[in-house]
Amino acid sequence: MKRQRISDLLARPEAGGDVDIAGWVRTKRDSKEIVFLNVNDGSNLAGIQVVVPRDAACFEDARKLTTGASVAVSGRLVDSPGGKQRFEILASGLRIYGLADPATYPIQKKKITLEYLREVAHLRPRTNTFGAVFRVRNTAADAVHRFFQERGFVWIHTPIITSADAEGAGELFRVTVLDPASPPRMDDGRVDYREDFFGRETYLTVSGQLAVENFCSALGNVYTFGPTFRAENSNTTRHLAEFWMIEPEMAFADIHDDMDLAEEFLKYIIAVVLRDRAEDMSFLAERYDPELLPRLEHILASTFARITYTEAVEILERSGRPFQFPVRWGMDLQTEHERYLCEEHFMGPVIVTDYPMEIKAFYMKQNDDGKTVRAMDILFPGVGEIVGGSQREDDLEKLVSRMRALGMREETYWWYLDLRRYGTHPHCGFGLGFERLVQFLTGMSNIRDVIPFPRTPKNADF
Ligand code: 4AD
Ligand code: MG
């Protein structure tokens, strides 16, 4: 059967013609005379109303249907008298693929909480909320590629399995095929990873940055967009153990170019989602967050504030707020500080630059003051840090001395250091946490609700 997408049918200029659809029943109302179904095929939020009159051959079949059943419908596309949507289908034929027992089907029409839906994450895409979230996520992902492709950035497929800790933060998931009960051991008792699959210790990547830096040193402007993994024991509404990250890297560019790119990029994605997913966005705004659309529009109209870390600390000190973590120069900004800066002081996005060297990764370019590095974090209202980036240290000696100070093994990073030995150049990049962006776009307050199957401490169900 050649079926049509419901969203395409509803976009037609006028009613008329024979149509075929297939999807899942969301609701059914029936009487002795008529059955009304709402069928959803995932192509839009509202689905389409199907009307089965008593004289239709499929009337008795239609009465058997319940929420969750899968069905194909053929009929005529007619104007909908109710006015809730433009068209409906007057059914003449109906094929039931699978019924869904109303006694046990977990996604009934009644109000269900997001917490409950996480326990049935395999079925939650069948709700209005998750249909909307995942269509928005798809549109945003597509816009990511469009943005970079339109600007000549080359997409690099960076490896998932790595031997280097790109962030130097030690939050690595180990990759091994050794038997945990009796691994081969060296004389001193430590596990002998030379016997392991790769002949060395390997991990899931925490960031594709080191790999895109390599390709940046040849192809100019590049980016990666893929899954990253952090064994970070943070049980918050903003942290996942497996999340997707977008990491561009630009050659012969500095931190100002980096900030310009990030700001343009974020606005581009927001504009595309507002334009192309209007129905889903209105639903999410209505259901969860009446400020959602004005907040996104405000971002498009605003210029991101740009301040140094030192200025941020001064603003926070002057605020007179009784922060849970008292502010002092040298500390990492906590969520409460980030929120104060963008939600109360600047009332919009803020880019904070030139953080203390001690709290940032080894690869960031050192400033002449000997204390700070060319980092830039973008803070968003509600979400906090959404982007983390920097200009990279391109001076071999400075980079090596920083790595030594941090106790990092130069041998592991020899190939990364080669970039500074042969034709080094200024370059910069950033990482955007894709789920944090989707959270901001959809107004969902928990990051577990914007990824299909969230991986968090003590949870890898589904
Ligand atoms: O600030 P991070 O750690 O920076 C990097 O990984 C750099 N290598 C990026 C670069 O310069 N190429 O992470 C970047 C972003 C954060 O700003 C945040 O949005 C997101 O990744 N992120 C997480 N998102 C969800 N769950 C987590 N556990 C995350 N950790 C970071
Ligand atoms: Mg960061």
Image (tube, rainbow, N blue to C red):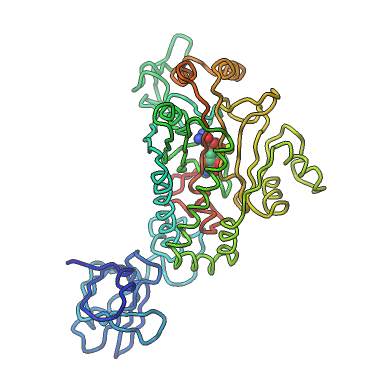
The x and y percentages for residue 334 are: 68, 42
Say which quadrant the N terminus sits in.
bottom left
Which is more toward the observer, 198 or 394?
Answer: 394
Q: Horizontal placement of 288 versus 164: left or right?
A: right
At 54% from the left edge and 66% from the top edge, which residue is drawn? 285
Q: Horizontal placement of 459 versus 18: left or right?
A: right
Which is more toward the observer, 167 or 13?
Answer: 13
Q: What is the count of numbered marks?
A: 0
Q: Is residue 49 above or below residue 182?
A: below
Q: Horizontal placement of 315 versus 293: left or right?
A: right
Q: Is residue 207 above or below residue 459?
A: above
The x and y percentages for residue 85 are: 39, 79
Quarter holding residue 292: bottom right
Can residue 457 be seen here? no
Q: Horizontal placement of 63 versus 447: left or right?
A: left
Quarter holding residue 101: bottom left
Can residue 45 be seen here? yes
Q: Is residue 262 above or below residue 117?
A: above
The x and y percentages for residue 106 are: 40, 64
The x and y percentages for residue 177 are: 35, 26
Which is more toward the observer, 288 or 460?
Answer: 288
